[in-house]
Each structure stands twice: as structure tokens, then as C-alpha cells.
Image (cartoon, rainbow, N blue to C red):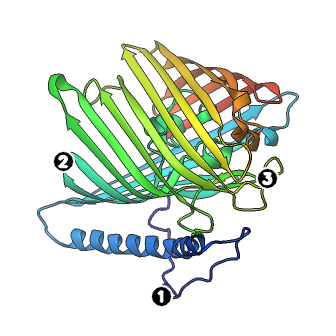
Amino acid sequence: MPVTLMGARFDYSGLHKRRRVKPRRHTDSGASIIRAQILEEVPIMIRRCLAGALVLLASAAAAGEADPLQHQLLAFGSAEVAHVPKSNLTAIYSRPEVLAADVLFTLQRGPIKLFAEYELTDHESDLERFQIGWEPSEHMVLWLGRFHQPASIWNSEYHHGQYLQTPITRPGVENWDDDGGVIPQQFTGVLAESNWNLPRGRVLRIAAGGGLTPVLTPEGLKSFDLLRPDADEHRFGYQARVALMSDQFSESGAGLVFAQEKIAWRDAPPIPFPMLRYVDFRLAGAYASYVHRSWKLQAVGYYIDAQLKGTSFRDSDLLTGYVTVEDALAHNLRVFFRREDSSHLSEAPYLRLFPRWPTARSTFAMRWDFTRRHALTAELADTYTATDHYMEYRLQWSAALL
């Protein structure tokens, strides 16, 4: 999530110059050369669009005094320690200690909006989201920038805010790109969001977007970086989410998600698939959540079809999902249980690119809000991967600082 949003500077020097197309690993046809040249210009086009949108935002802020300038700053902090006996922490995309700060900033005047999220940890920092939007009506917002995947159920609720979620960890299928995730979680492009009021107080929420998808590297998926733009091998994808909520403020509801993306391998092809060119990735999912008094239940299921282009493995079908249950034992004490599971693993060669991804896991967590906006959480997980089985023990402090 963005923290130093306004401090993120864009270098506009040399935008008029055409960047040299890097040599390709494979023999290129005329169409692929044209596509490569277009993708080389994408960072320039994105930065120009963002620059123009910023100018539009400044113009709107300087115009009409009838619309007051609205802004908000939120900051979350967390500190975590983890212990995994008889296992290599780095081998399971985890670290023994993590310090993190997540800052969100919003600015709006009239129909023009700006939203940014910056995350800073003891091992990395990233402009997670940077969005400039236009609100043509009270029901719709059109955005340009870097976003979280709308087809991710967990992202739609919690994003990076550790304080906002009861457990410490995310479901394995919802892991971030750089944390061993198998589903692209971020993209850069355009996003449309809308809310429609229906009879009996129900609300229909729709989000649809498209833009540059991550690339595959030996370390996992890597998203397009606005601060260090490089469109080499990034391709295009589309995502959508439709949700029907019981009312405007309720967490009870159900929805469908969809994504279709092409994910290229950036570096030398992986050892399991030396002829791999790219992954034709499709995702379809459904979810339902129900809140009654202190109880919250949620069920999420995904169908993944990942075709490994250039290899003899054409299809890679996978069914995966999770169920969560949580309850408030007292006003400041909550318990949480999550079960994750997958099927058709033998029919999913795509998972060979992520050997440490949890194929099944049971997680129990207890959270104590010991003072206003500060919480302590303890978590225990029993985890299975394709090649390993281990226990995870975690303790975390989290807070909403602003």
C-alpha cells in the first residue's frame, strides 16, 4: 500500500526518444517484433497518461471553489516473528522477523480523485497502488494506474492492511506476486468500478480492468513497477469481479470473479520447461460470505487453467480454495480458523514453477485488541506443499497508527 505517494517522482526526461528493443530469446516474427516495439513504448505512454492525469487533478483542485478539497491519510504498522521447526524459512517464502508500515493517501476535488498506497518493510519497499480517477456519476469511478487484482477475493477486503484482517497470513492462493503467489495479484492499466442500488436494499458491485500483467522469474511473479518501469516481456490481461451484497454496509454477499492473462517468462527458461515461452492463464472463481452477529463465515473457490505455451504440457487444470470461520469471544478477543485445499494437483504442471506453494493448510489464529487500534495475534498453521510438511508458529503486533 502506498505511503510516500506524493514523494514518488516520475522522471519525464527523454520521453520523446524511442527505447531500443532488447534482443529476444526466440526467433521473432514480424508480428512479435511489432508487439515488442509497442510494449517498449508502454512505460512512456503510462507515465505520460499519469502526468496528464496529475495535471488534470491540479487543474480541478485550482478550479471551482464550490467543491472542497478532501483528503485522508491512513497508516498501518506491524511487527511479526515466525518459527518453522525443521524447515528452511527462505524456502517457504517467509522470514523470521518482519517489520512493515503501510500508508494510504487519498485526495479528491469534485469528480477527480487520487489514491496511493506505499508499503515499506525491513526487506523491501514498493509503490503498491497509484490510481488517478474520474467519477462521472455517484455510481461509477474510472481509474488509471497500478491496482490490485479485482479477481482476488482476499485483496478486495484487506489489501496490505495487517490490522484489518484477523489472521496473520493470507491464504496461499492469495499470496502476493513476490511472496510465492501463483495468481497474478497486481496489474497496471485501467480499472472501472461501479455500485448499483437494487430493490430491498441490495447492492450490485462490479469491477473490471485490463493492463500489463506480471512476468515469471526464478523468484516467482514480478509485477510492473511504476517507479522503475520496464515493460520487457510484460503482456496484457483482463480481470473482473461481480458481487451482490445484502446491503450497502454489510459484509454478507456472494460474487463471481474472472481473469485472463498472458504471463511471459523473463529470464532463461525454467529447468522443468526449457521451451516455455509464456503461460496462457485463465481463472474463474466464486465466493460467498455471511455475517451474523459476532460470526463471520466465508467460502472461496477458484478454477485455474494455465496453458504452458511452447511445451508439450498444454493444459494445467487446478481447483483450489479455502473456507474461513471466525467469532468474537469477547468485544476485544476473536478466534479464527481457515482450511485451504486443492485438487487435480497431478494435472497442474504449472505448479512445478512454484514448488513451495502450500497445496493444503489448516490455520488457527487468536487476536487480542489490547488497546484502541492495537492488536496482538498468535497463529498456528499445519502446512503441506508438493514436497514438504511443516508447522508454522507466528506472533504479530499490528496497529492503525493514523
Q: Position of residue 104 (x, y in %)?
A: 44, 52
Task: Assign a secondary structure to mark 1.
Answer: loop
Q: Is residue 350 visible?
A: yes
Relative vertical location of residue 146 with respect to residue 42 in this rendering, above or below: above
| Residue bearing the label numbered 1 | 16
Q: Residues within 10 Å of mark 2 (few under 14, many from 20)?
A: few
Q: Secondary structure at mark 3?
A: loop
- Of the image marks 2 and 1, the number of the one nearer the N terminus: 1
Q: Nearer the viewer, mark 2 or mark 3?
A: 3
Residue 347 location, quadrant = top right
Camera-side residue of 203 and 258: 258
- Gap in Å between the C-alphas at discs 2 and 3? 48 Å
Q: Amino acid at mark 3?
A: Pro
Amino acid at pointer 2:
Glu
What's the amino acid at mark 1? His
What is the C-alpha distance between the residues marked 2 and 1?
38 Å
Where is 157 relative to 340, above or below? below
Question: Residue 372, how many percent across, how many down?
Answer: 45, 31
Cα–Cα gap, marks 3 and 1: 36 Å
Mark 1: few/some/many CA within 10 Å (<14, 14-19, 20+): few
Relative horizontal placement of residue 42, taking residue 110 as reference (left or right): right
Which labelled disc corresponds to residue 270? 3
To which residue does mark 2 refer? Answer: 138
Q: Nearer the viewer, residue 240 or 293?
A: 240
At 44% from the left and 46% from the top, the residue drawn is: 239
Residue that protrudes farthest toward the right in the picture: 86
Image quarter for residue 78?
A: top right
Left or right of residue 253: residue 35: right
